[in-house]
Image: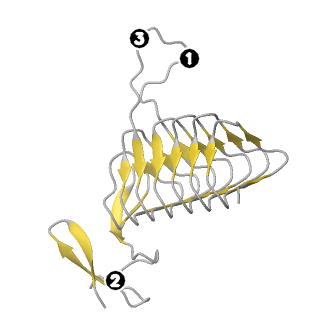
Amino acid sequence: MGYFKHEKALVHAEAKIGDETRIWAFANIQAGAVIGRGCNICDGSFVEKGAIVGNYVTIKHHVSVFDGVTIEDDVFIGSNIAFINDRYPRSHRNDPWTLEKTLVEKGATLGSNAVVLCGITIGTYAVVGAGSVVTKNVPAYAIVVGNPAEFKGYACRCGRKLDQDLRCGCGRQYALKGKELKGIDR
């Protein structure tokens, strides 16, 4: 089957790209990058060696996914997201650098122009609002917005905000078990 590569995209022969993935113009995929099946990597995006992108992920325009960033399946990454992988960046380093890993779990949505600091986990089906600065872990299904990003409620698996009774307009219902949101079978 293979994947689609726009004629103006750079994809190193040693990158691992899954079937049915589409890589658009001016994207740059380095050797050692791993991208799963059915992804959409939009114009001007960069995936560095050591970055891992799961299946059916959408990475919109001008996103850099650096070494140490893992994006699980079914994640949406909005345009111009900034993933940070160095807490103390310098142009010239004399000391050893410690890579702090970042994880974006299954089904999460990150709005355009968000900044995600290193060493962060964004939970399953969480929603990060556009322009937010994520400085700490985001729980599963949580909605966070602002600078720094703050909790504003819970999201359904479909992406809509849950009401005060933890119900969604799509028909799903949830319950809090301790600090963890769990779906209630319909």
Q: Closer to the N terminus: mark 2 or mark 3?
A: 3
The nearer-to-camera label among 1 and 3 is 3
For residue 135, above or below residue 91: below
Q: Position of residue 46 (x, y in %)?
A: 65, 41
**Screen quadrant of the N terminus:** bottom right
Q: Identity of the amino acid at label 2?
A: Asp
Front residue of 104/142: it is 104
**Which residue is denoted by mark 3 in the rendering?**
95
Horizontal and vertical percent position of residue 10: 76, 40
The amino acid beneath tag 1 is Ser
Q: Residue 47: x percent and y percent?
A: 61, 41
Mark 2–mark 1 distance (CA, rounded to whole Å): 47 Å
In the image, what residue type sits under mark 3?
A: Asp
Residue 79 is drawn in which quadrant? bottom right
Kindly identify the residue that appears in the image at 59 percent across and 36 percent down.
48
Q: Which residue is mark 2?
A: 163
- Report, in whole angstroms, how far the alpha carbon at label 1 lies from the one at label 3: 12 Å
Number of labelled discs?
Answer: 3
State the residue position of label 1. 91
Q: Residue at x 26, y 85 (%)?
A: 165
Q: Secondary structure at mark 3?
A: loop
Mark whose residue sits in front, 2 or 3: 3
| Mark 1 element type | loop
The foreground one among 173 and 14 is 14
Which element carries disc 2, helix, strand or loop? loop
Asked if residue 10 lies left or right of residue 120, the reply is: right
Sequence-wise, the earlier of marks 2 and 1 is 1
| Residue projecting furthest to the right | 7
Q: In the rendered image, which quarter is residue 156 located in?
A: bottom left
